[in-house]
Image (cartoon, rainbow, N blue to C red):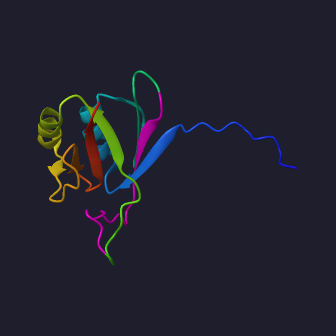
Amino acid sequence: MVARKPRFSLATVAVDCADAHALADFYRRLLGWEVTCSEPGWVLLRCPEGGTGLSFQSEPGYRPPVWPERPEEQQKMLHLDIRVDDLDEAEAYAVALGAARAAYQPQDDVRVLLDPAMHPFCLFLR
């Protein structure tokens, strides 16, 4: 007999990086989210409308992932998919904030960018 399932609710996705405050500031400006908690080496962002948050944690031994993945290189553990209204406009805005367009673009209707810590993230149309 299986025990009654307890309630689970995803509250936050934590992202490791070299500088939590710098990366959180990038995503704060990109997404328009608010800093709801800030400590040395850790920052929490939340969407003003609610939902799952993003936290950023400084890791002294952080190694940025490579995109596309290559054997023997640091692999990405996750990536963010961000819905936008206009790919060109959203890409230009993200790049102005410090992102870089990835050299490898696997789909025409998705833009893969790299945040300042080199995590890939995807922009896609609504």
**Magenta stretch: helix, strand or loop mostly:** loop
As drawn, 23 above or below 75: above
The vertical placement of 122 against 50, above or below, is: below
Where are the magenta residues, as a range? 51-70
Residue drawn at point x = 39 percent, y = 27 percent: 47
- Residue 10, position as x, y percentages in the image: 55, 39
In the displayed orientation, state which residue is furthest to the right: 1
**Nearest the camera: 33 or 6?**
6
Q: Residue at x 29, y 48 (%)?
A: 121
Q: Residue at x 42, y 21 (%)?
A: 49
Please check the rendered image and state whether residue 2 is part of the magenta-colored stretch, yes or no: no
Q: How many marks?
A: 0
| Res. 17 image quadrant | bottom left
Q: Answer left or right for 12 relative to 63.
A: right
Pick out the residue farthest to the top.
49
Residue 104 appears in the rendering: yes
123 sits to left or right of 8: left
Query: Residue 38 location, x and y as percent?
Result: 41, 38
For residue 22, say whether it is visible. no
